[in-house]
Image (spheres, helix red, strand yellow):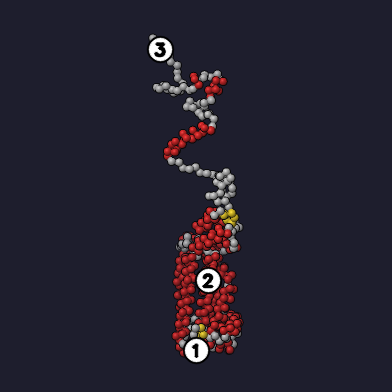
Amino acid sequence: MDTIASLFSFITTPVSWVIVQFHSVYGAIFGPDTGWAWGLSIVSLVILIRICLIPLFVKQIKSTRAMQTLQPEMKKIQERYKNDKQRQSEEMMKLYKETGTNPLSSCLPILAQSPFFFALYHVLNSIATGDTIGVINQSLLQSAQKAHIVGAPLAAKFTDSASKVEALGASLTDVRVVTAVMIVLMSASQFFTQRQLMTKNVDTTVKTPFMQQQKMLMYVFPVMFAVFGINFPVGVLVYWLTTNVWTMGQQMYVIRNNPTPGSKAQATYLERLHKHVTQHEKVGRRRDRAIVKAIVAKGRDRNEFERKFINGLSKAGLAAQADGTVIKSESAAAAQAEDGTPTTAAGTPKRQQPKRQSKSQRQHGGTVGAKAAGENEPKTSLTKSGRTEDEPATAAKQGGPKPAGGTRSKAQSGQRKGPQRPKSPSKK
C-alpha cells in the first residue's frame, strides 16, 4: 500500500496545503489540537473534491444510461458470436464507437478521486510515523498527533498494536470500537447506495447481464470496504465515509429529479410532475421541461409510464408540446361544438360511432326507419312492382295504360306474378 501511495506523492503537497488551510479556520473555532478541527478539515477536503468532480459524475450518469440502452444490442452480439470471442470484441467496440459510448466512463469519479485518496493516506501515515510531509511542519505534526475523534487518534488503525496506540495517547479498545463502527457505517452506506440504484433507477423492462453484474457488485463492494477498512487510518475512514455519504445523497437527488426511463423512480417522478402540471397548468422548472420534451419526441416509443403521463394530461384538458411546455386543450371527452357535436382537441367535428342495437331493435329497425323516413320525405318510395307511386302520372302523359281505380292490381292467388299471356278462346 505504501508503494502505491508513494506513486501519488506528487499530489501530497496540494492535499496537505488544503488540509492546513481548513485547519486554520476550524482551529480558530474549536482549538488547533482538537479532533473537530482536524476531522472537519478532512470532511471539507472531501466536499471540495466532490464538488470539482460533479462534471465527471454527470458524465458517469449519461454513460451508465447509454450502457443500459445498449444492453439488448450487446446481448444480440454475444449470442451471435458466442463461439468467436475476437469477433465479439470487435463488434462491441464498433457498437461503442457508433453510439459514442465509453464503458469506462462509469468509473471516472472513482478513478479521478483515487489520487486524492492515496495522497491523504500517505499524509496520515506520515503523521502516525512522526514524519513531516508537504506543508505540514513539525508543529502541525504534533498537533495532528494529539487530535482524537471520539477517543481514537487520526493516524490509528484497527490492526495497530497496543504499544503503538498508547504512543498516540489512546487505548486499543477505543481505537477498535471507533474504527469498527466507522467500517460498518462505510460498508452500509455503500450497500444502500448500490441497492437504491438497483431497486429504483434501473429499467425493469429489460433483463440483461448488466443488471446481474450490478446486483453482484451490491454485495461485493461492502465486503471489500470491510476487508480493506481495517488497514485504513481513522482519518482515511473519515474521508471514505464522508465520500460515501456524499455519493448516496447525490444519487438520491439524481434519482428523484432525473430518473432512468422505464424505472420505478420514473413512475414516481411522472406522478409528481403530473400532479404539479395539472394544478398549475404549466411546467415550471427547466429540468422538467427537458424531460417532457424528450417524452413528446419519443412518439410511439414511449414506455408505459410515459404513455400514462401523456394520457393523464389529455384527460385534464392539457396537451404537451414539442418544446416541453403544456397548453390548454379541449378534452376529447368533454369538448363540444356550439351545436353539441363532440370535437377533437383541434376543433374538428368528431365522428360519432353508432350505438349497438339489440337483436329485436335490428329486426324492427327497418320498419321504424321506413316510417320515420315516410313522414319527412315525399312519397316517392318504390312499390313492389318496381315503380314509384308517382309513375302513373308519368305513364298517363306518355299514353300508357292507366291502372284501374288509380291503384295497382294485385296478383290473384294461384296466378303467376309478372306479365300474363292472353287466354285462348275455349272451344266448345
Check disc 2 and give the amino acid type: Gly
Check disc 3 and give the amino acid type: Ser
Q: Residue at x 55, y 20 (%)?
A: 396
Q: Position of residue 337 (x, y in %)?
A: 58, 46
Q: Residues within 10 Å of mark 3 (few under 14, many from 20)?
A: few
Query: Helix, strand or loop at disc 1?
Result: loop
Measured in 3D between alpha carbons, the distance from the residue under mark 3 to the one under mark 1, in whole angstroms, is 151 Å
**Would you say the residues marked 3 and 1 are in contact, meaning their CB atoms lie under 8 Å apart?**
no
Q: Residues within 10 Å of mark 2 (few under 14, many from 20)?
A: few
Q: Position of residue 351 (x, y in %)?
A: 54, 44
Which residue is labeled 1 in the image?
Answer: 169
Q: Considering the image in quadrants, where does the C terminus appear?
A: top left
The mark lying in front, picked from 2 and 3, is 2
Point out which mark residue 401 bears. Answer: none
Check disc 1 and give the amino acid type: Gly
Q: Nearer the viewer, residue 32 or 111?
A: 32
**Would you say the residues marked 2 and 3 are in contact, meaning their CB atoms lie under 8 Å apart?**
no
Q: Residue at x 50, y 61 (%)?
A: 267
Which residue is labeled 2 in the image?
Answer: 249
Which residue is labeled 3 in the image?
Answer: 426
Q: Is residue 104 in sight in this rendering?
A: no
Q: Nearer the viewer, residue 128 or 78?
A: 128
Q: Position of residue 241 (x, y in %)?
A: 51, 77
- Badge 3 or badge 1: first in the primary sequence: 1
